[in-house]
Amino acid sequence: GSKWSYIGPDGEKAWPKKYPFCGGVFQSPIDFHKDILQYDSNLLPLEFIGYNVPSTDQFTLINNGHSVKMYLSPTMYIRNLPFEYTASQLHLHWGNRNKSEGSEHTVSGKHFAAELHIVHYNSEKYPDITAAMDKSDGLAVLAILLEIGPFNPSYEKIFRHFRNVKYKDQMVQVPGFNVRELLPDRLDEYYRYEGSLTTPPCYPSVLWTVFRHPVKISQEQLLALETAMYCTESDDPEPLEMVDNFRNVQEFHERLVFISFRE
Ligand SMILES: NS(=O)(=O)c1c(F)c(F)c(S(=O)(=O)CCO)c(N[C@H]2CCCc3ccccc32)c1F
Ligand SMILES: [Zn+2]
């Protein structure tokens, strides 16, 4: 299994020993601050096809010991990127109950409470995500920044299942729903840059789209995310809470982040 973690001797400083790309170029996440941003009028709103999955279909939600991830249906894809990218899975990154600052990307040095990632692979060039994930044009990940606000019934369609995936390798079926509801209203405003997976093997294979506008979930929903899951299996004598599962921002020199909006 993947022997890496977010804390202790196998934490992110040690990743490059076993996973050399983690010490390499184009690493994610990064901080978005004004002197690396450049407006690009060619950045179009993304189009989401097949995102409205009927409740007769089911998504598999699984605790993989690093995050909680939900497999998506291969009928879901995005257009208006250099290629067509088919959805693979979504997962989250978050902090802990005493410090709700668990986003991976930051804006002017500020963390958001949490971050949702929807991972897609280039289905025009590669047969599946395994073939795509180490290619420079292989993956496209959408990132949604989460902050505290009113209760969010769309996120609840995933969150209400957390009690059934408390421990590593537990899984549950989630009835299909319109995954578009998890995204902010303004799909036309986003940050765009070429980066990497934020977990080992850290391949520099990701075209990142980070939406400008955060989505709100309630304090109670955030607390559930921060306290529901463990990295360890149900029978482990030393349970480890799944908290602070975000990578720190990486050096980003001589590169630009393109923005689809004029600030
Ligand atoms: N932040 S991130 O970079 O988007 C990101 C994660 F943070 C993350 F935890 C995962 S993981 O849950 O699979 C556990 C670690 O691989 C992924 N998986 C991707 C890349 C690795 C292999 C793979 C295979 C099938 C589907 C998705 C993926 C990931 F892309
Ligand atoms: Zn992620």
Image (spheres, helix red, strand yellow):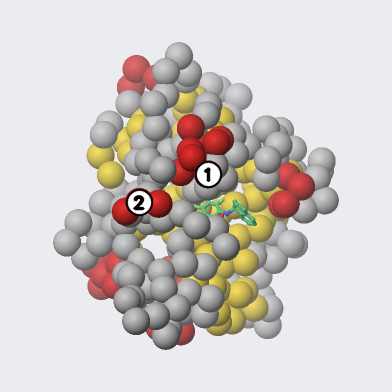
Residue 97, above or below 253:
below
Q: Residue furthest left?
A: 98
N-terminal of the pair, mark 1 or mark 2, is 2
What is the quadrant of residue 155 in the picture?
A: bottom left
**Residue 203: % across, % down:** 59, 39
* Beta carbon of the mark 2 residue lies under 8 A of ligand 1: no
Examine the rendering and report whether any part of residue 125 can be seen: yes
Q: Which mark is residue 18?
A: 1
Amino acid carrying label 1: it is Lys
Q: Residue at x 68, y 82 (%)?
A: 56
C-alpha span from label 1 to label 2 = 12 Å
Across and down, in percent, residue 25 comes to 53, 26
Q: Is disc 1 placed on a helix, strand or loop?
A: helix
- Please say if 36 is above or below 250: above
* In this rendering, position of residue 31 left or right of residue 82: left
* Left or right, residue 235 beside residue 82: left
Indicate the secondary structure of the residue bearing disc 2: helix
Where residue 221 sits, quadrant-wise, is bottom left
Expressed as whole percent of the image width and height from the top left, the position of residue 179 reads 56, 63
Q: Amino acid at mark 2?
A: Pro
Residue 209 seen in the figure = no
Mark 2 surroundings within 10 Å by alpha-carbon count, few (fewer than 14), some (14 through 19), many (20 or more): few
Q: Position of residue 146 (x, y in %)?
A: 35, 54
Q: What is the count of numbered marks? A: 2
Question: Left or right of 54: which side holds 243?
Answer: left
For the N terminus, the image quarter is: bottom right
Q: Tell me the residue at 25%/62% (across/down).
A: 96
In the rendered image, which quarter contains the C terminus? top left
Front-most of residues 165 and 237: 237
Q: Which residue is mark 2?
A: 9
